[in-house]
Image: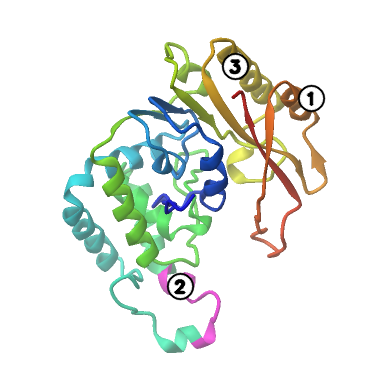
């Protein structure tokens, strides 16, 4: 398969970009309606050709960013102008246009100079959002791009609390945004923010529909997995069984082993379906070592 893989401009945690070519080769070739209850950053749907897209994520802020980007797809010029206003106001780095980080800072902090340079402006922007309780998807998008590990995280009081990351608004971000705009502007897309069970409440399926599920992984240690429990896992797998009985095509991404942990419940359950090994090369953020992980794509076709 020689098709160029598109990456989501959200660069979101759990992104499937590096695995996308393997996944697409295992997806059905003809898809009418595409359903994705755990859409996340959106890299998967950006690489799927379908007649309609029904995309969902429990994170309302994430969904609002997607809706905002889709609404700006036909006027990307205005979008980038609005981005530049915020970047310049808060004096954030923007290497996609020019490099404003001093050489002295680069020499002193060879691996973290973006974080050092952007820290003050980023914290001012974050403070502005939290103080004024602004729910501006453009500002949240910029916070996500400059934030640590490119996540959206809020404390119990509802305040955005992620520190600055060692990242920049660079040419890769602009390229991903333009690819996103090009893809979505002529597509029929519906975004929702529901619990995955409610997402499937009223859906009827036709022969060529396809559901792709990439839930939080029970045995991994990501921030967004902390609310996923054995009960959640059980409910999801039971839901998949019900969808399978309806005859709808579906695929589930998951991991069976992770750094010494094993998901016995999943391993037993998946024996009734087809299991495809996915070669992954995830690197631990904390120690730069390759993670011991066995990732699979489970399909019913």
**What is the crowding at mark 1: few (fewer than 14 residues within 10 Å), some, or many (at least 20)?**
few
Dot 3: element: helix
Looking at the image, residue 216 lies above or below residue 72: above
Residue at the location (26% across, 58% down)?
83
The residue depicted at 47 percent of the width and 74 percent of the height is 116
The dominant secondary structure in magenta is helix
Disc 2 versus disc 3: distance between alpha carbons? Answer: 44 Å
Q: Find numbered disc 1 in the image and state the secondary structure of the residue it sits on.
A: helix
1 or 2: mark nearer the eye? 1
**Which x, y percent locates residue 171?**
35, 67
Q: Nearer the viewer, residue 276 or 243?
A: 276
Q: Nearer the viewer, mark 1 or mark 3?
A: 1
Residue at image location 80% in from the left, 41% down from the top: 261
Badge 3 density bin: few <14, some 14–19, many ≥20, Cα 10 Å? some
Task: Residue at the far right: name it.
Answer: 260
The Cα–Cα distance between marks 1 and 3, rounded to whole angstroms, is 16 Å
Can residue 252 be seen? Answer: yes
Pinpoint residue 251: horizontal percent, then vertical percent. Answer: 57, 29
Name the N-terminal-most of marks 2 and 3. Answer: 2
Residue 15 appears anywhere in the view: no
Labelled disc at residue 268: 1
**Left or right relative to 249: residue 282:** right
Residue tagged 2? 114
Image point (51%, 17%), residue name: 248
Q: Which mark is residue 239?
A: 3
Question: Looking at the rendered structure, which numbered label has been put on residue 226?
Answer: none
**Residues in magenta, as a range:** 107-118
Alpha carbons under labels 1 and 2: distance apart: 46 Å
If the image is split into quadrants, where does the C terminus sit?
A: top right
């Amino acid at each position: 398969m020689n098709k160029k893989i598109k990456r989501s401009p959200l660069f979101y945690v759990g992104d499937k970009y590096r695995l996308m070519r393997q996944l697409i080769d295992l997806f059905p070739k003809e898809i009418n309606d595409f359903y994705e209850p755990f859409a996340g950053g959106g890299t998967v749907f950006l690489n799927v050709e379908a007649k309609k897209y029904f995309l969902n994520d429990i994170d309302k802020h994430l969904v609002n960013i997607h809706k905002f980007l889709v609404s700006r797809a036909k006027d990307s010029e205005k979008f980038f102008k609005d981005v530049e206003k915020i970047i310049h106001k808060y004096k954030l780095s923007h290497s996609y246009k020019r490099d404003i980080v001093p050489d002295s800072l680069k020499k002193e902090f060879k691996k973290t100079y973006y974080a050092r340079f952007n820290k003050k402006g980023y914290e001012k922007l974050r403070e502005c959002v939290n103080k004024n309780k602004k729910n501006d998807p453009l500002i949240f998008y910029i916070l996500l791009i400059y934030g640590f590990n490119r996540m959206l995280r809020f404390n119990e009081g509802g305040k955005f609390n992620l520190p600055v990351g060692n990242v920049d608004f660079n040419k890769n971000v602009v390229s991903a945004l333009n690819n996103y705009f090009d893809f979505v502007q002529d597509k029929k897309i519906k975004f929702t923010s529901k619990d995955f069970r409610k997402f499937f409440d009223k859906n009827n399926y036709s022969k060529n529909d396809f559901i792709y599920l990439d839930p939080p992984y029970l045995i991994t240690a990501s921030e967004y997995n902390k609310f996923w429990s054995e009960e959640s896992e059980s409910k999801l797998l039971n839901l998949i069984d019900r969808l399978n009985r309806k005859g709808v095509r579906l695929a589930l991404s998951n991991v069976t082993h992770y750094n010494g942990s094993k998901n016995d419940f999943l391993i037993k359950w998946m024996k009734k379906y087809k299991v495809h090994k996915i070669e992954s090369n995830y690197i631990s953020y904390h120690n730069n070592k390759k993670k011991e992980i066995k990732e699979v794509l489970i399909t019913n076709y």
